[in-house]
Image (cartoon, rainbow, N blue to C red):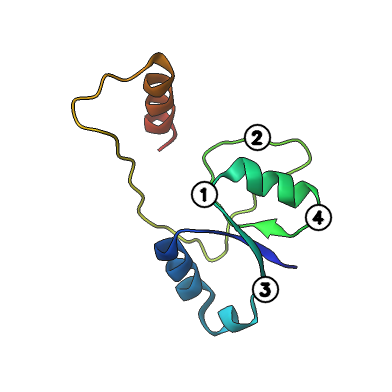
Amino acid sequence: MPLLMVRRELVKNELANWFGDAYEQVEIAATYNLIVNAAFMVEQGLGVALCFDLGAVFDNLRFVPLSPRMETGSVLVWKKNQTLSAAHTRFLRHLRNSI
């Protein structure tokens, strides 16, 4: 089954390490930046998406964790001294409660 892979090079490298020697056989059908786009491609039958489980829910799709488990670091950044909108504040609260 082809994979939909995140576009970020650092994450790709971590996934390549997780796959080990089998990574040479991985068929990458597409790359993505937004999970919503990847979800649409999966629903269209393009392949399976490798992504973080942040609690997003999509009809007809389910999250299956990697085995053995893979853990990685992640960062979220924004401009210093910037006033955050209500949506930004709720998003940050959601992330803090999810982690």
- How far apart marks 1 and 2 lie (CA) works out to 12 Å
Q: Secondary structure at mark 2?
A: loop
Task: Specify the label residue 15 is tagged with.
Answer: none
- How far apart marks 3 and 1 lie (CA) works out to 20 Å
Q: Are the residues flagged by discs 4 and 3 in contact, CB closer than 8 Å?
A: no
Q: Between disc 4 and disc 2, whose residue precedes?
A: 4
- How far apart marks 4 and 2 lie (CA) works out to 18 Å
| Visible residue check, residue 62 | no
Which residue appears at 49% of the width and 67% of the height?
Answer: 15
Categorize mark 1 by other alpha carbons within 10 Å: few (<14), some (14-19), many (20+): few
Figure quadrant of residue 60: top right
In this view, the mark in front (3 or 1) = 3
Task: Specify the label residue 52 is tagged with.
Answer: 1
Which residue appears at 37% of the width and 17% of the height?
Answer: 85
Task: Tell me: residue 55, above or below residue 17.
Answer: above
Task: Specify the label residue 27 is tagged with.
Answer: 3
Q: Between disc 4 and disc 1, whose residue precedes?
A: 4
Q: Secondary structure at mark 4?
A: loop
Which residue is the site of mark 2?
57
In this view, the mark in front (4 or 2) = 4
Which residue appears at 70% of the width and 36% of the height?
Answer: 58
Image location (x, y in percent) of residue 95: 41, 32
Q: Nearer the viewer, residue 51 or 81?
A: 81
Which residue is the site of mark 4?
45
| Left or right: 23 in relation to 96 | right
